[in-house]
Image (cartoon, rainbow, N blue to C red):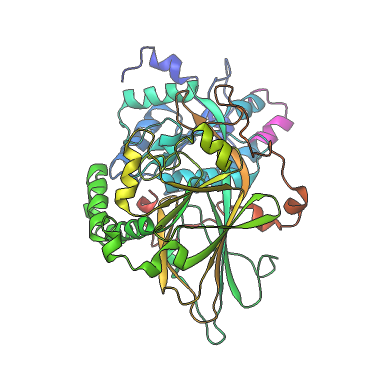
Amino acid sequence: MNVNFEPHSFLKEFHIPAYILAPGSEAEKLGDVPSCPVLVFINSKSGGQLGGDLLLTYRSLLNNHQVFDLGGEAPDAVLRRLYLHLETLKLNGDEFAPKIEERLKIIVAGGDGTAGWLLGVVSDLKLSKPPPIATVPLGTGNNLPFAFGWGKKNPGTDRDSVLAFLDQVRKAKEMMIDSWHILMRMKAPTEGSFDPIAPLELPHSLHAFQRVSSSDELNMDGYHTFQGGFWNYFSMGMDAQVSYAFHSERKLHPEKFKNQLVNQSTYAKLGCTQGWFFASLVHPSSRNIAQLAKVKIMKKHGEWQDLTIPPSIRSIVCLNLPSFSGGLNPWGTPNKNKRRDRDLTPPYVDDGLIEVVGFRDAWHGLVLLAPNGHGRRLAQAHRIKFEFHKGAAEHTFMRIDGEPWKQPLPVDDDKVVVEISNLRQVKILATHGCRSRSVHDPSSPTTPHGQDDGERDSDEEESVGEEWKKFGAADTFKIPDEVDISHLS
């Protein structure tokens, strides 16, 4: 795509002066305030060679100080430094600083895990004027970028492609997106030390399941407690099992996973070898969701109710965005009768509701490729809780925003609980034709039936500690040195 304008004057609209980004730099003589100043964060290890190439192109077009390699510096450190310096400049009467802060946008290039990391950092820092975030698809699934109109194919890394993307960012609209807190408890053994999941098995794109501090009120005597958050989905069952097989294979043979098309082909083959297409023959019924766990939902604050899961369901997805498994929409758009009879709504991204969908097997999942195809719609809820039965199976597989792990399940009197709750919102940038819909968008239907118009239970909000309200992406987020950040995809 060619951009039909003079590049130099165009790029000035995105340029941030060095003295604002780097304390101690000499102040510049400035003209007009840029209309769309950007900070760019790139996972240089995503997309094979593409991440590194994209980093070089952005640095050739913009101020080096506004383009960051996530392999070199964490985004929370960058944003803390920048916003502290902006406050200092404003106190000293700098006229440019408040306008930069007002108009600032973030671009993040990487997989869904990388994009979620940035969203989590901005959420945790609670900035007075948080910048909206545009996501460049540079991973395998790219569900988050696709949901907001940025595509799902790896982008071009040449000069013209980057200029075209910057032009899209300049024209993009702002949307709010819900985030979801997830809490997991498992009973500790009565004797000896025991870490229920190996640290490197856990999802780390959002530092999900960071063990909470001993003083946190969410801790319970005799239990290990983990918490984290997600933006797109939590899934459990056979789809997560296939994803786990893919990630395990990629860790063993990273040299084979440098191409997006090859990655997707390998993923499809693993779906066959793991039995996802022939689940009724090879998948133990003890691992079906209804046999594994009792599921409860909360549609109205403070009122839990049991959710009936059909016995044939082998995979369950709790979905926030209309993009799953490479851009599919498992919830679809319920017709008027479904909305009336079952109290269902379209999948809005800012309504405080999460869509719960079930699948029998991969053949069932293929209905998503048909017009108006969708999975088994089970519920919409503000909160959902899984209470796992003892002795049902030794383990199951879980996945958060593309990051899978193998979850041990209770034996004897042990107990494992996973609870998902609506957390807060962050601004995201979207193209005007994107598939995600907002309850506040005039082009969307009126506020959905059963939605509480944004009211939240203030007593409930006050009852939880500050740790609960964080993703753990800022301050505590640190990818272990031995982990290749190319896996954040």
Q: In this orientation, which residue lies closer to the viewer: 16 or 307?
A: 307
Would you say 209 lies left or right of 483 here? right
**Residue at screen point 41% across, 55% down:** 403
Quadrant in which residue 451 is drawn: top right
> Mostly what secondary structure, the magenta segment?
helix
**Residue at screen point 41% across, 66% down:** 396
Question: Where residue 411 sits: x, y (%)?
Answer: 48, 79
* Residue 90 falls inside the magenta stretch: yes
Question: Where residue 146 sits: x, y (%)?
Answer: 40, 35
Question: Where residue 234 sits: x, y (%)?
Answer: 48, 53
Would you say 89 lies left or right of 334 here? right
Which residues are drawn in magenta? 86-96
Q: Is residue 348 visible?
A: no
**Residue at screen point 54% across, 48% down:** 379
Question: Where residue 271 sits: x, y (%)?
Answer: 27, 55
- Residue 488 drawn above or below residue 329: below
Q: Is residue 188 visible?
A: yes
